[in-house]
Image (cartoon, rainbow, N blue to C red):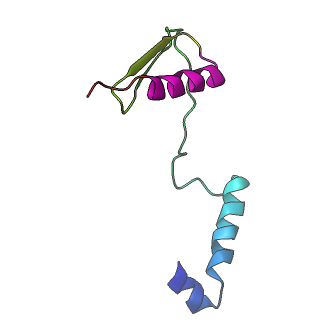
Amino acid sequence: MKAYALSQGLDVKDLYDGKKSLVKKGILPRTRTPRFQRAQVAGVVEMRWQVQLPNGVTVTVSGSVDAGVLGTVLKTAATAWMPAS
């Protein structure tokens, strides 16, 4: 595209902008597939969170979790339990 634009005395950005405009109007087809697809929830499953901390403690929580509460639990578990030396 760059070589063609230069040979025709055009700015390559103008070519891309023009193509984008034609695609939006439906005159040109999309040349690539969309990056995201719609998703649907098939059913409700039990939520279960499990976090392995560097000190070896594993925290497991079932159900929905408030971010503030989870943060407090993780901080407490990370600092309160220390392995025996």
Q: Is residue 69 magenta?
A: yes
Horizontal and vertical percent for residue 37?
54, 35
Q: Using the image, determine if residue 30 lies above or below residue 45.
A: below
Residue 71, picture quadrant = top right
Q: Is residue 75 magenta?
A: yes
Residue 59, picture quadrant = top left
Residue at the spot 55% in from the left edge and 26% down from the top edge: 39
* 27 horizontally vs 85: left or right: right
* 65 horizontally vs 33: left or right: right
Front residue of 3 and 37? 37
User: Count the marks: how many?
Assistant: 0
Horizontal and vertical percent for residue 41?
55, 17
Q: Using the image, determine if residue 64 lies above or below residue 75.
A: above
Horizontal and vertical percent for residue 40?
56, 21
Horizontal and vertical percent for residue 76?
52, 24
Residue at the spot 71% in from the left edge and 54% down from the top edge: 24
Q: Using the image, determine if residue 45 lies above or below residue 68.
A: above
Residue at the spot 55% in from the left edge and 45% down from the top edge: 34
- The magenta region covers 65-80
Quadrant location of the C terminus?
top left
Of all residues, the one furthest to the front in this rendering is: 85
* 12 horizontally vs 54: left or right: right
Front residue of 77 and 46? 77
Q: Using the image, determine if residue 2 lies above or below residue 32.
A: below
Residue at the spot 61% in from the left edge and 89% down from the top edge: 8
Query: What secondary structure do most residues of the magenta stretch adopt?
Result: helix
